């Protein structure tokens, strides 16, 4: 069973926004055994949309369209869909009631014609109620194929996918079983890893595929299986993972299917009933932000001192200015003092600190751009490591964050 | 002049990674007057890649392919491109030398066959040297059309686009002139804004298009013009903006072409020689991280206290526990105390604080999920505002961050 995703909107094609909707929809479809054949981003243009719909109908059984449903003049999706189905637009009273409710409860302004027009839908479509916004989802059939049109606003689209589209697809099609298992590794490059596990990879059964996903110091190994027999697939994937793990013991960090390393750390800390504090300099709040993006962070995360200037390391973190003068603000000594002092200040079981120079120019220290020290303090120990993360600011911050999580997970996992 | 972008990789189609490359490439192409007709994401599959190449050749003059060039077994792009051009792969000594250099300087391990194979390129291709990685870019011509194949690793791809592809395209084609101007507004919904400026919008000349880009409390208005005559286009867009601004004075924040609001704030503070500190609770470091993602943040940003538990507001920020007990940790009083104390602690001109409940469950306070107080302190004043940002954690954090920047920019812009 194949799907195609069509995203409509000039803002994607001029690069003003990144299309995150397609990844969300692809993940949701994969989970129910629907493979995405292609993702196509097209212009807000009638003939282009018609062409994309026609091609998608040839490639796929399920066509999901997002975007182009807003109230303003650059949106022509709905009229084009009606034309594609030899149909016309009619007012949906159900949608109009929803729009009236939203305007009464949230917008608190009089309804305008552009909003009322959002209740127009192709007469052949089944409305998918959008509880979070005024643009409805629409479900249309053509022979055995299903077309779904959704608003482009991510959280409205997500609500419709989770609550309406996925359940209706499950009900409409007999779907095979798909399973992914992703293994997170740190510290070995893609090609060295590939060479090391070559024998194992070559012996994988043909219904399981392996992909390497390298990213700034970590490589994810993704196993993807597809089979009608659910238990057989799950057992086979588990067995393959079991035979792989001893070969990559030194670089294996964990499994990451829907879980990032920060979520894994959060779960460990919560289970162990332990707490964490941070003292961030060159990462500028990125580590705190990554942790607190996930619900439940307040169970283990006490706080961070983002000390973005030399003097604030003294003021807010009580790092002595003598130490800074003797060793420089980017040094193992200062990193360790930051971690120790954060541990004491926040009274936590673990504290992690970063100090470095993310670039593009040298700061209060003479060290090279890209030099970063990361320190970890516990009640029993404090240590630090030095890294060179290159001279691209974005990558230095991201690599330092990745490495910090790697060091932290290793520390937490110590027996 | 039209381009099509083809991204290759199952990891995009299963939703494991978001395709950010296409947005970067689209933006770079638009700047030199090349419109992106379509973005197509296809599977790591020979027949699918061949089909996409054929269709792109019909639609566009320039075809940019990213991904599928890694050293491991799931990559078949290069062989397929050779087949499409009736060509075969040959070893490029120039590429091999680059690989040897990278292995010697950075990897510091013996070269393996999979790495040596990365030096294979179609014999008809012109190599685009990738200084940041082992997979080369390739430039091929077919009649008047140009095909470019690039590695999928974002920073390698970016280096090749900026340093090689864009200059070569400028040299190969006579290109029209494109100009975008994006106006950032806060506080008025898409449809209200559309209604207010309807008359102005209707009078736009046909070579200028308007798009509405709404996102969590802000709407960007994007004007896009395309004309052979550069000066005429620039003048016309400036005149249109001048006639629009008086109509949206109350919601206008600034221009955002390549600039986000945090960059605009950073420039203002740097120019005014003023400094900023933060005290973040519910935003968990997001505001600090957004500011420090940009170079030069250390000129104006002193630091942030991320106080993620009630007691750390007392410990690290010196907010009295009486105040917290009397008013609750999520209150105007606590928000204002956090801002005032951050101002004092970091000795800055401005301080901003957030306290609230991002959900999904209620925390140490009884307030509803989504309630957020944002306070601003200066040497002369302190004030706060209360908001309800709904019950989606991600959106609460993002909306609070957006609103904080909006309040901050207004405060900084005060005469």
Image: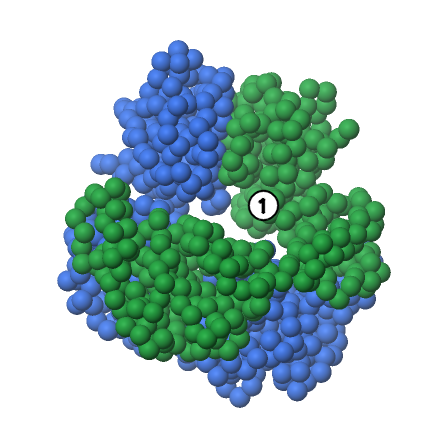
Chain colours: A blue, B green
Q: Tell me: residue B397, above or below residue A369.
A: below
Q: Residue at x 84, y 60 (%)?
A: B199
Dot 1: within a 10 Å radius of its alpha carbon, few (fewer than 14), some, or many (20 or more) residues? many
Q: Secondary structure at mark 1?
A: helix
**On the rendered image, what quadrant is the C terminus of chain B found in?**
top right
Q: Tell me: residue A43, above or below residue A362.
A: below
Which quadrant would residue B176 be assigned to in this image? bottom right
Q: Is residue B20 visible?
A: no
Q: Tell me: residue A84, above or below residue B81.
A: below
Q: Nearer the viewer, residue B111 or A188?
A: B111
Q: What number of labels is visible?
A: 1
Which quadrant would residue B127 be assigned to in this image? bottom left
Q: Residue at x 60, y 69 (%)?
A: A43
Q: Name the spot of residue B376 as percent of width and height, x first.
A: 67, 29
Q: Residue at x 73, y 68 (%)?
A: A118
Q: Residue at x 72, y 35 (%)?
A: B410
Q: Name the spot of residue B235 as percent of width and height, x first.
A: 75, 53
Residue ID for mark 1: B398
Chain hosting mark 1: B
Image check: B279 left or right of B47? right
Q: Nearer the viewer, residue A311 or B245?
A: B245
Q: Name the spot of residue A296 as percent of width and height, x first.
A: 46, 43
Q: Tell me: residue B240, above or below residue B269.
A: below
Q: Name the spot of residue B207 as percent of width and height, x first.
A: 72, 64
Q: Is residue B240 visible?
A: yes
Image check: B253 left or right of B31? right
Which quadrant would residue B320 be assigned to in this image? top right
**On the rendered image, what quadrant is the N terminus of chain B found in?**
bottom right
Image check: B271 left or right of B37? right
Q: Nearer the viewer, residue A357 or B185?
A: A357
């Amino acid at each position: 069973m194949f799907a195609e995703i069509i995203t409509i909107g000039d803002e994607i094609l001029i690069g003003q926004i990144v299309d995150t909707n397609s990844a969300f929809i692809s993940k949701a479809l994969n989970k129910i055994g629907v493979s995405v054949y292609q993702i196509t981003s097209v212009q807000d243009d009638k003939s282009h949309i018609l062409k994309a719909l026609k091609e998608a109908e040839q490639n796929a059984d399920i066509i999901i369209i997002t975007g182009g449903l807003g109230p303003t003049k650059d949106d022509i999706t709905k009229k084009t869909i009606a034309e594609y189905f030899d149909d016309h637009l009619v007012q949906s009273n159900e949608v109009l009631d929803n729009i009236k409710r939203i305007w009464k409860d949230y917008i608190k302004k009089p309804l305008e014609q552009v909003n009322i027009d959002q209740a127009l839908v192709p007469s052949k479509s089944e409305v998918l109620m959008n509880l979070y916004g005024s643009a409805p989802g629409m479900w249309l059939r053509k022979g055995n194929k299903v077309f779904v049109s959704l608003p482009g606003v991510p959280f409205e689209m997500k609500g419709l996918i989770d609550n309406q589209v996925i359940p209706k697809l499950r009900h409409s099609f007999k779907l095979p079983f798909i399973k992914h298992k992703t293994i997170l590794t740190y510290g070995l490059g893609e090609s060295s890893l590939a060479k090391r596990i070559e024998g194992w990879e070559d012996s994988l059964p043909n219904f399981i595929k392996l992909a390497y996903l390298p990213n700034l110091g970590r490589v994810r190994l993704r196993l993807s299986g597809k089979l009608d027999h659910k238990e057989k697939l799950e057992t086979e994937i588990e067995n393959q993972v079991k035979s792989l793990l001893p070969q990559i013991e030194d670089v294996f960090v964990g499994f990451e299917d829907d879980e990032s390393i920060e979520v894994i750390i959060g779960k460990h800390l919560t289970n162990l009933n332990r707490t964490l504090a941070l003292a961030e300099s060159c990462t500028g709040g990125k580590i705190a932000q990554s942790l607190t993006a996930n619900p439940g962070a307040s169970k283990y995360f006490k706080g961070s001192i983002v000390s973005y200037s030399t003097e604030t390391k003294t003021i807010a973190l009580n790092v002595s200015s003598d130490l800074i003068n003797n060793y420089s603000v980017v040094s193992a000594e200062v990193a360790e003092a930051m971690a120790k002092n954060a541990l004491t200040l926040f009274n936590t079981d673990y504290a992690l600190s970063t100090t470095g120079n993310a670039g593009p120019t040298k700061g209060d220290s003479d060290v090279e751009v890209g030099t970063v020290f990361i320190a970890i303090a516990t009640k029993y120990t404090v240590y630090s490591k030095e890294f060179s993360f290159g001279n691209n600011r974005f990558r230095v911050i991201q690599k330092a964050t990745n490495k910090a999580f790697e060091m932290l997970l290793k520390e937490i996992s110590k027996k």
